[in-house]
Image (cartoon, rainbow, N blue to C red):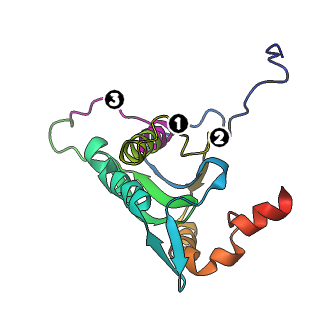
Amino acid sequence: MAFNPEKHHRRSMRLHEYDYSTEGSYFVTICTHNRQCVFGEIINDKMVLNDSGRIVRAVWDDLPNHYSYLELDACVIMPNHVHGIIVMAGVGAGLKPAQIKKRHGLQEIVRAWKTFSARHINEIQNTPGLKLWQRNYYEHIIRNKTEWDHLREYIINNPAKWECDLNHPSIWEHMG
């Protein structure tokens, strides 16, 4: 089938003309390829990470070492998706302006996280090039403290609500 730009274009889920590298807080959800459960399992309402889940967590925790303006808040790695809050912090400069290399936006940070985690997991499992993540991700700009508190609570309680989660495999079995 020939490429037709009218039919074969991806619509961006991002807010049009918003600069995702500016100071702000973002809630992100990233799903695995085909929503496969590859990061561990829920036992007694708690997420128990396997080796792949621990790698995803380690790469998440390491992000501020690569992006100095980045702060991480709540995060939960579920069997087939991840929820987290990423904060693009302001740059505190004293009397002299702070020296910052290029400030990457949210899309680049998520891309790097997905790439590094997939590459490391594929190296360990000897599955080079195997898709780990879905192509896109969901993001929400956090606008106030009430939203922040609600999203943090949602993240913390997510494992206990796994059976009702829209990403739970039983939901997708009924749809497919």
Spot occupied by residue 46 in the image (x, y as percentages of width and height): 49, 80
Task: Measure the alpha-carbon separation of dots 2 and 3.
Answer: 21 Å
Quadrant in the picture for the C terminus: bottom right
- Under tag 3, what secondary structure? loop
- Please name the residue shown 84% across and 20% down the image: 6
Q: Is 154 drawn above or below residue 14 in the view shown?
A: below
- Under tag 1, what secondary structure? loop
The reply to whether callout 2 and callout 1 are in contact (CB within 8 Å) is no
> Mark 2 highlights which residue?
15
> Mark 1 highlights which residue?
19
Q: Is 151 drawn above or below residue 60 in the view shown?
A: below
Q: Quadrant of residue 68?
A: top left
User: Given the current orientation, which residue lies at the most extreme front position?
Assistant: 126
Q: Is 30 drawn above or below residue 8 in the view shown?
A: below
Q: Please state which of the two labelled residues, at mark 3 or mark 1, is closer to the viewer.
A: 3
Q: Which comes sooner in the sequence, label 3 or label 1?
A: 1
Residue 149 magenta-drawn? no
Q: Quadrant of residue 94?
A: top left
Task: Measure the alpha-carbon separation of dots 2 and 1.
Answer: 9 Å
Spot occupied by residue 50 in the image (x, y as percentages of width and height): 42, 65
> Mark 3 highlights which residue?
102
- Please name the residue shown 45% across and 74% down the image: 48
Spot occupied by residue 2 in the image (x, y as percentages of width and height): 82, 13
User: Which stretch did the figure color magenta?
Assistant: 99-113
Tell me the amino acid under the disc marked 2: Leu
- Please name the residue shown 72% across and 30% down the image: 10
